[in-house]
Every structure is written in structure tokens, then in C-alpha cells.
Image (spheres, rainbow, N blue to C red):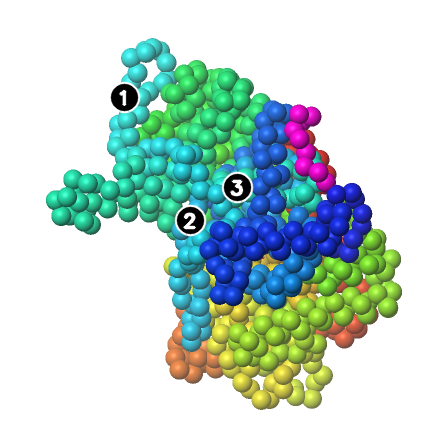
Amino acid sequence: MNEVAAPTRAPTEPGAEPCAERRAADPAQEVARLREAVLEKLCYSVGKDRNTASDRDWFIAVALATRDRIVNDWMLSVRAAYQENRRRVYYLSLEFLIGRLLIDSLTNLGLVEPMRAALAGLDIDLDKLRQVEPDAALGNGGLGRLAACFMESMATLSIAAHGYGIRYDNGLFRQTVTDGWQHEYPEDWLDFGNPWEFPRPEVNYNIGFGGVVESTPRDPGSAARIWRPGETVVAVAYDIPIVGWRGAQEHNFVNTLRLWSARAPDPLRLDAFNAGDYVGALADQVHAESISKILYPADSTPAGQELRLKQEYFFASASLQDLIRRHLTQNGDINTLHEKAAIQLNDTHPAIAVAELMRLLVDIHLIDWERAWEITQATFSYTNHTLLPEALETWPAALMERLLPRHMQIIYLINAKHLDHLRAEGMDDPGKLSALSLIDEHGGRNVRMGHLAFLGSHKVNGVSALHSELVKETVFRELHEIFPDRIVNKTNGITFRRWLFEANPHLTKLLGETIGRDFYDNPEALRALEPLATDLDFQARFAAARLANKTALAGLIADRMLIKVDPNAIFDVQIKRIHEYKRQLLNILQTIAQYNEIRAYPMRDCVPRVKIFAGKAAASYYMAKLIIKLANDVARVINNDPTVRDLLKVVFLPNYNVSMAEAIIPAADLSEQISTAGMEASGTGNMKMALNGALTIGTLDGANVEIKERVGDDNIFIFGLTAEEVAARRARGIDARETIAHSPMLREVLESIQDGAFSPDDRHRYAPLVDMLTYHDYFLVTADFDAYVSTQMNVARRWRDRKSWWRSAILNTARTGWFSSDRAIAEYAEDIWNVPVRAP
Ligand SMILES: *Cc1c(COP(=O)(O)O)cnc(C)c1O
């Protein structure tokens, strides 16, 4: 690293904002330099004049000027990783839910205030430009957001890492709600270009599909074969530099998120074009490019479509070819790949990479099978994100044989050797062997991608303590018995830069003024807040910061929804994908119960609440869309009923995305984490809200369990069946008639829905929903209803005692430092990847 000429750095001196010491020695000079850079970009890159430039033009100019500051360090990082010949981490994920990057990049470079000042001198408002940036939504929800947080933390910890994914032309759909129903529209995030990316047309790989496999004449004893694909698609790289916290510091890495876009090898068939068939001439191009056209919008359920399998193989193959090329350029010998590369599979979506690496090693690099398998296992590790048996990815063997004939052979051979080995060890129970097989023989032959990822990896991890234990007991029970050391836990985390510093500058400023800025670099330093939790003066300042955030959110709600909400009410927030297991329905039923109470007992003193919902439903998920409609129907009735006297408001904010999360989370008083126990792998929304001082109402599910352990039982509201009780209860049956009969309040709520109280225009609208809850309540909404309602009453009681509430809220912020994604990544680095980390 010594030969690398480091750029001149400013001396370190504390400032008023995170990373302020990265400013130039003379702040005025820094501001002037930035202003000049922005004007230059506006003129020479955007091609606009100051007087005619739109906000979008200014945004592009500012983003490009910011990017320039990143690129220098990016080059140095690439060079340093090369010279130190580091073991590199490759994070393969079909989803990256990135969100906006402007403020994120400026924050990590320590340039927010200098850029604000530079623009103010031009009469341009940075916060306005912030809103112009499209929200990059190349993911559905938690899984994709985790990948984005991890990219930022890997850069922060100076891990030489590359993210690999797909550059979808259309990310997650834009949701509108008309008449209470969700509608989906394509998201046009690339329409005006993406100023953060660098197209790399020279970095491209051929990706084959279909065709035939021939034996090799080389060596009759070898496992190698020659695959002659019937179709070829080209993967072209686009790079986004990812700058970590204190990104301008010398030793920090700026990492690369490399996203692949699909192209046809010959975009235009001139013979067809010349013959007058203009559509046919372009057919190959359209067909090939469909692979990177859209993100599959399903969450928690596998898509099961041929195009989806093509996407998975397309990006896995391109990424492996790319990282092998890098390895060979530097090291020359494919045999040392596992020493220099650690590949993390984010869920089973990239699991086909296991078979693809075997193919590349055995067929192309002529490594013998056993050695290739050792390299493969030593290179890969796999993160499991779901327990739902129906959500575990499998692919019909027939489809795989047609699309990836060579890979199917390899999978059969991996399986045969695996089962032979088990039999040689004395296993003869056919039930066990079939559970351990890569091929599921029930109802046609299907390849179990989870099993393939498990076998091809040296470590498999769950994403919360509870989830990892359940992984051992359920989906991988038999494999865990045979490989008892393979499954480990890595509880998820979130980047505090985005979810505290950027989303909540009011609170960040207060914390810095109160406990100093150690927590900027060491989240555990938030503990210094604990003694202040009962300090009335600090409580007042904490409450004031929160009120400012709530007032801002109230403004947003007024603007978008024309609903007036009182910032002094409890903001009771459930924001996440709409899914039956997440139980928005339980929340809505309780909302109706409270509405009934307010009307029945107008004399009772009731705590004002605003129920805030946001989230998208998979387009094909009928029940989830009906739940959105119910939330909106209930909102309309309650918000327009004068007898409610503003004691209760219900808001469904359309088009939930990262930017909206950033606006809602700092304003949440109560965080709804009420999934059926055993079904939410971890959750990260729960961490974001607790960190920002919301109290959680939740079940003992996912990371809620660990949040409870850390914040303490008095500072969280836990209710409901445990994962074990859920399993026992389901075993007894999920007909809920008896449960409903025992709860007068629930009966009244269900009857009002049934009778059309919220759907006077269509009285039967919710019949399927009420039927489901009554006869087939798999998610145990009814079983947890009474406990949830009484816990919500505890919440209201607690809110009345504001000193006690603020104490708990402050302790939530003080005690959730552990949920930083830096902590999570440091654990992966040590236990799974075996790479060094360097704190910022
Ligand atoms: C954090 C986040 C999620 C995950 O939320 P959960 O409550 O953990 O399901 C989903 N979408 C967005 C936009 C997020 O920021």
C-alpha cells in the first residue's frame, strides 16, 4: 500500500456534523470548490445554463460533482485491494433496495454542509434536490434492504467487497391507491439516467441457455463435458461506487456494486431487416433484454417462472466469470480461488452459482471433481431468509434440464455422491435419505435450491437467534444432524448512517450535543444516554426532537392525503410489505375495536392515536390487496365520523419505499412488529424504529426477541403466542369459531366487517376475509387478538405517563447500538469470510 500516493488530506478537527473533519482546511475554500465543480458539471456534463436548469438538471450536476469526490478513493481502493492481494468478499443478491444516494454519499464524505452552503450561494436548496432523486428500488423489502446496508457497512469496515446483482430497467412497481385498491405502475427510475453508475461495455460475458452436452474426448475418465448452449445472452456490467462512513479517510475502501444488464449478441438481424421484417429483426434483442427488464415483485414466495430462473443463472454466471477472471489476472492459479474469494449467497436466488462454479472448474479449468468440490465449499456461504416450506425455492428438474442441461447433470452428480457418502456412513432410512436429497420426488422431480446452497457452502446462517434455531429444527433438520457445525447465526443489522444520521438529523444533533460524537463511529457509545433517561431536561429535548419529526410527517400526510393529524397523538406505525404473516389484519381489527369503543363510551378518556400504514402487496396476492382495501375502507369511515372527535385517525400512505421509510421512522412512537411467531426471520424495520426511539409492540418473533433482551422488558410491549405455542395451536386445528365465540370484542369487530359497515357499496366485499379468519386462521390473528388489544391498552396507559414513556424511548435508543450492520458485517467477516476488518 506504500506505493499508493494518497491524496492530500485535511487535518482532523471536530466539527458540528458527522465527518466534519474531512473538510478542507479552509471551509470557505471547500465550499467554493464544490460550487465551482457543480457549475462545471451543469455546463459540461448536463449541458445546461444556470438560468434554464431545472431541479433535475441541478440534481444531476450535484450528483456528478459528488461522484467525482468518490472516484478518486475508488481508484485507490481498487489498487490497494490489488496490491495487498486481499481476500475479496463477493455478495451475490438478486435484490439491492438502495434508495436515494445523494445525501448518503455526502454524509459519508462529510460534505453535507459544505454542499448545502455551496448551493445556497447559487440560490439552490439541497433539500429540494434531495427529493428529486429517484428512489432506486431494485428489491422488494427487507432482504434487498439488508444487501444495501451490508454494502455500506463493508465499505465502512474496509472490507474489499463487490456486490453483484441485476440492473433492472424497472425496479419494484410504483403503487397507487385509488378507491382503496392498489394499482401497480412501472417504476421509471432510469428515465433520466443514473448519475451514480458507470457503464462498462467492455466488461461483458456470454451466458448460455439450453442446447446440448457432449462428452469430452480429452479423457474418458474425467467428469468434464462440453456444453453447447442453444442460446447466448450477453451480460454487460454497470458499476456503482459505494462509499462507506468516513469515506474520505485514507484507509477506507470505496467498493463496487456491479449490476448486470442483458443484451443480445447481435442486436439487429440485418437479413430480416433488409427483407422488411422490422419486428422480427429486433426479436432477439427484445428476447434477450427481457432478462434484466423487471424485478419480480413477489416477496416471501418464489416466482417459479422460467424467466426468473434465467435471471438467477444470468447474474450468477456473469458474476462468477467476472470474479474468476479477476482472480486469474492476479493470482494465475484457479486452485487458490477459495483463499482469495469468499462468496455470500443472499438467499437461494443465486444458489445455481454452486453448480455453475463446479461447471467452470471441472469443464473449463479441468480441475478434478473432488478438488473442485472442496474449492466450491470453501468459497461459498449461504444466508437463509425464510422458513416457510412453501417459500423455499425449488425448480422442476425438467425445466432445468431444458434451460441448463449441464448444470442438471452436475446437480445429479453432486446428489449421487452426497447420498452415496451417507449410505457408506451407514444411513439406510429411506425417509431420511429422501429428506436429504437435492431432488424432491414428491409431485414431480424438483431441485431443492436450499439444499444445493447448503451442501455447496462451508457455512449457512439464519438472520436472528430465533430464526437460526428454527432453521436447525425445521427446513434443514436432517442436514443439520449430519453437518452440526454448518449452521450459524448472524442477526441482521441496519446502517446507522442512513437510518439515524440522515433520516433523523434532529435526534442525531441532540445526541451529539449531549453525549459527544463517539457514537458516530461506535454505536455502542449510545449507552452513554442511559443515565439521562430519567433526566427531565433531556427528556424534554428528546421529546422536542421527536415532535419536530412528527410535525414534518403530519405535513407530508396533509399534502399527500389531505388528512389532518395531530402531532401530539401517538403515531402508531406499521410499515412493511403487506403479508398475512405480518398481520396488518390484526392491527386493523384492533383499530376497529378502538373505534367501536370510542363510539360506545364517549365519556371515556381516550388517548388520541394516528394509525399509520404503508406497504406494497405482490400484484398477484389477492388477500394482501384485500387487506389494503380494508385498511383504506376503515380509514375512510373512521376519519369521516364526527363522533370520533379526532381521537383516532387512520392513514394508508401509498408507495412505501426507502425514502418514505426515512420520513416515517423518525416520527414513529409505536412500532408494530406483530407477525405470527416463528414466521418473521428477523425484521429490520423493528431495529430502525427502536433506534429512533419508538417503543415496539410485538410478538416474540425474529429479532424482536433480541431487541427485548437488549432494551429490557419494561421498555417493549410483548404479547401473543410464542413460536412453540403457534406450532402446538396449529396442530390442534385452525378453525377459529371457538376462539371468536370467547371474545365478545372480536365478535363485534368481525360482525361489523361482515355486515358491510366499512363497505356499504359492496356488503360482501370482505366475506372471504371473514371466512378465512373464522374457519381457516392459519396466521392465528384471532388467537392473538385479545392479548393484542389488552397490550394496546397498556400502551395507552403508558403514554399518559409521559415521563415513563420518554424514559423507555430514550433507553431504546441507548440500547440498540448492537443492531448496527457494522456489527453484523464484522461477525460475517470473522466467522464466515475470514477477512480482516478495520473500524472507521
Ligand atoms: C427496512 C425496510 C423493509 C423491511 O421492513 P420489515 O419491517 O423488517 O419487514 C422493507 N422495505 C423498506 C423500504 C425498508 O426500508
Secondary structure at badge 2 equals loop
Secondary structure at badge 1 equals strand
Residue drawn at 75 percent across, 50 percent down: 26
- The residue labelled by disc 1 is 214
Residue drawn at 31 percent across, 42 percent down: 288
Residue drawn at 53 percent across, 74 percent down: 560
Give residue 257's mark: 3
Label 3 to label 1, Cα distance in Å?
36 Å
Query: Label 3 neighbourhood size at 10 Å, few (<14), some (14-19), many (20+)?
Result: many
Q: Position of residue 403 (x, y in %)?
A: 31, 36
Q: Which of these two is toward me, 257 or 632?
A: 257
Q: Kindly identify the amino acid type of the residue bearing the numbered disc 2.
A: Tyr
Vertical position of residue 243 compared to residue 677: above or below: above
Query: Quick check: is the Cβ at mark 1 less than 8 Å away from ligand 1?
Result: no
Vertical position of residue 369 compared to residue 88: above or below: above
For the N terminus, the image quarter is top right
For the C terminus, the image quarter is top right
Q: Which of these two is toward me, 48 or 365?
A: 48
Vertical position of residue 309 compared to residue 573: above or below: above
Q: Kindly identify the amino acid type of the residue bearing the numbered disc 1.
A: Glu
Residue drawn at 58 percent across, 41 percent down: 71
Q: Nearer the viewer, mark 3 or mark 1?
A: 3
- The residue labelled by disc 2 is 168
